[in-house]
Image: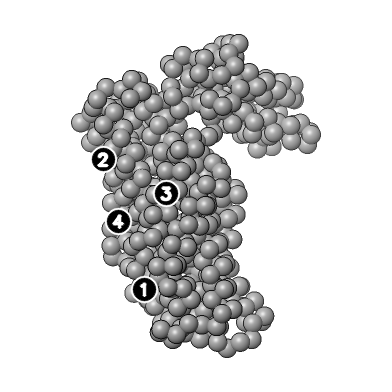
């Protein structure tokens, strides 16, 4: 298979299966976030709700694009992702997936809403930090801290945004909807009025769809990390993209940058300036007159990927610099050329997207019971009302949708759980929260990153030693 020896091929298949299992667990771990309201309020039967949610998760992955997936891939510099020994890639992937699965499964078992996003990001950062201390890391950066910072802010702000926005939405609800029924606790075994069922069905569907778009892309990102790390020659470049067309994009990027005023450049700006020139030359030298990546020898394809990634990253940093004097027209042209150039390296094969869609959709259809009760009964001292469930899900779907649009991973769990907390506070203040449950959820939120960082970093060093 792809010219791999038997042992490496077996390990590659194991890594792909573990990635699918992670996404499967992600499905049933996060199912309760979407279906808790419709099940708890008797708006849908559990079987109908989870199938409905699973189907919309599937559609969400299919239509979600690739930006969040590439954000996951780009958290690790390419020197960490790929080196001369493919077993090092295996060590990285196994450490990442085992630590992420262990934490996700453990929190699900105890019925604690926790973030699959935090789990995955922590595992990736753990590998990057551990790599920094390896003797064969010769001065290379171990983590793409710029990307990690953007991701960290998105994950940090999502629960705060969910909490505060849910309070506002509840306030709007009370002003617009005067029916007392919507603010009452569900009566066991009794269906709410049809309009409430339709409202909760819609919000459940939106959360499921956007969860698929965001969390599903994380699974796609993991698969692409595996394929690029172990088979860089086959998966570094999108074979559908014309190599010469990208060469034109890179030439235009360099042309715009070298014709700007450099008199105010500092050390960083000159570094990025030189990187653009260097890697454009490297791309042209390797690509030559070839039109398709299949015409380039396997060992050179990752070099082309590296040239495109390094060049576009440096160009983006120059755009953000206040010392980069450029007209608005040139800025728009530069951003457009960067976007086009990235098409060669930011992609996922259709079979990867389908595979992750199926795993997430199937996972969504099981395992929901443990967390639903926590969401519905244990966050507030009063059981969740129809209006509270709808408010929390409206906030969660908007937040996840915006994060996906910006290409940032965000926690569905944090958005919805914090939204439920906000609706409880909106009703009767902070005293309406159950202290023990909130402490358990907050502890899971706080501990996820450090635990997964330490676990994945330790496993990475162990597997590197074994392999």
Determine the CA span between mark 2 and mark 3.
Answer: 29 Å
Q: Position of residue 126 (x, y in %)?
A: 35, 42
- Above or below, 281 relative to 238: above
Q: Dot 2 corresponds to which residue?
A: 459
Assess disc 1: are there few (<14), some (14-19) or many (≥20) residues with their C-alpha within 10 Å of its C-alpha: some
Determine the CA span between mark 3 and mark 1.
Answer: 26 Å
Q: Position of residue 344 (x, y in %)?
A: 56, 28
Please state, as top left, top right, bottom left or bottom right, where the C terminus lies in the image. top left
Q: Earlier in the sequence, mark 2 or mark 4?
A: 4
Farthest residue to the left: give it: 466
**Labels 4 & 1 near each other (Cβ < 8 A):** no
Q: Dot 3 corresponds to which residue?
A: 358
Q: Earlier in the sequence, mark 2 or mark 3?
A: 3
**Labels 3 & 1 near each other (Cβ < 8 A):** no
Q: Residue at x 78, y 36 (%)?
A: 328
Determine the CA span between mark 3 and mark 4.
Answer: 19 Å
Determine the CA span between mark 2 and mark 4.
Answer: 17 Å
Please tell me whether mark 2 or mark 4 is closer to you in this view.
Answer: 4
Q: How is the image coloured?
A: one colour
**Residue 165 makes an appearance in the image:** yes
Farthest residue to the bottom: give it: 180
Determine the CA span between mark 4 and mark 1.
Answer: 17 Å
Q: Dot 1 corresponds to which residue?
A: 373
């Amino acid at each position: 298979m792809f010219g791999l020896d038997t042992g490496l091929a077996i390990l590659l298949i194991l890594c792909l299966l573990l990635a699918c299992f992670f996404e499967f667990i992600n499905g049933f771990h996060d199912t309760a976030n979407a279906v808790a309201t419709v099940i708890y309020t008797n708006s849908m039967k559990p079987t109908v709700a989870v199938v409905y949610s699973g189907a919309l998760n599937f559609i969400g992955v299919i239509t979600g694009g690739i930006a969040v997936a590439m954000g996951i891939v780009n958290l690790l510099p390419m020197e960490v992702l790929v080196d001369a020994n493919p077993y090092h890639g295996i060590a990285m992937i196994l450490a990442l997936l085992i630590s992420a699965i262990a934490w996700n499964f453990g929190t699900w078992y105890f019925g604690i809403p926790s973030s699959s996003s935090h789990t995955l990001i922590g595992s990736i950062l753990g590998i990057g930090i551990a790599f920094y201390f390896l003797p064969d890391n010769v001065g290379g950066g171990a983590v793409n801290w710029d990307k990690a910072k953007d991701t960290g802010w998105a994950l940090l702000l999502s629960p705060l945004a969910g909490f505060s926005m849910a309070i506002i939405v509840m306030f709007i609800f009370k002003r617009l909807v005067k029916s007392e029924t919507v603010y009452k606790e569900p009566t066991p075994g009794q269906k709410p009025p049809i309009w409430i069922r339709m409202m909760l069905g819609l919000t459940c569907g939106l959360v499921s769809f956007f969860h698929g778009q965001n969390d599903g892309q994380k699974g796609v990102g993991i698969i692409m990390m595996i394929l690029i790390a172990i088979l860089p020659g086959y998966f570094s470049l999108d074979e559908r993209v014309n190599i010469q067309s990208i060469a034109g994009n890179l030439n235009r990027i360099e042309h715009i940058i070298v014709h700007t005023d450099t008199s105010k450049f500092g050390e960083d700006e000159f570094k990025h300036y030189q990187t653009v020139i260097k890697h454009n030359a490297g791309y042209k030298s390797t690509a030559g007159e070839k039109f398709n990546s299949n015409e380039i020898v396997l060992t050179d394809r990752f070099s082309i990927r590296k040239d495109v990634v390094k060049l576009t990253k440096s160009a983006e940093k120059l755009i953000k610099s206040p010392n980069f004097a450029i007209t608005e027209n040139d800025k728009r042209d530069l951003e457009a050329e960067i976007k086009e150039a990235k098409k060669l390296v930011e992609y996922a094969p259709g079979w990867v997207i389908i595979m992750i869609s199926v795993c997430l959709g199937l996972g969504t259809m099981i395992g929901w019971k443990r967390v639903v009760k926590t969401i519905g009964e244990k966050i507030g001292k009063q059981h969740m009302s129809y209006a509270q469930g709808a408010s929390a899900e409206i906030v969660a779907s908007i937040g996840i949708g915006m994060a996906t649009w910006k290409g940032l991973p965000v926690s569905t769990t944090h958005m919805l759980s914090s939204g439920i907390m906000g609706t409880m506070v909106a009703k009767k203040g902070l005293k309406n929260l159950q202290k023990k449950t909130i402490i358990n959820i907050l502890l899971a939120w706080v501990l996820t990153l450090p635990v997964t960082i330490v676990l994945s970093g330790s496993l990475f060093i162990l597997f590197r030693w074994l392999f």
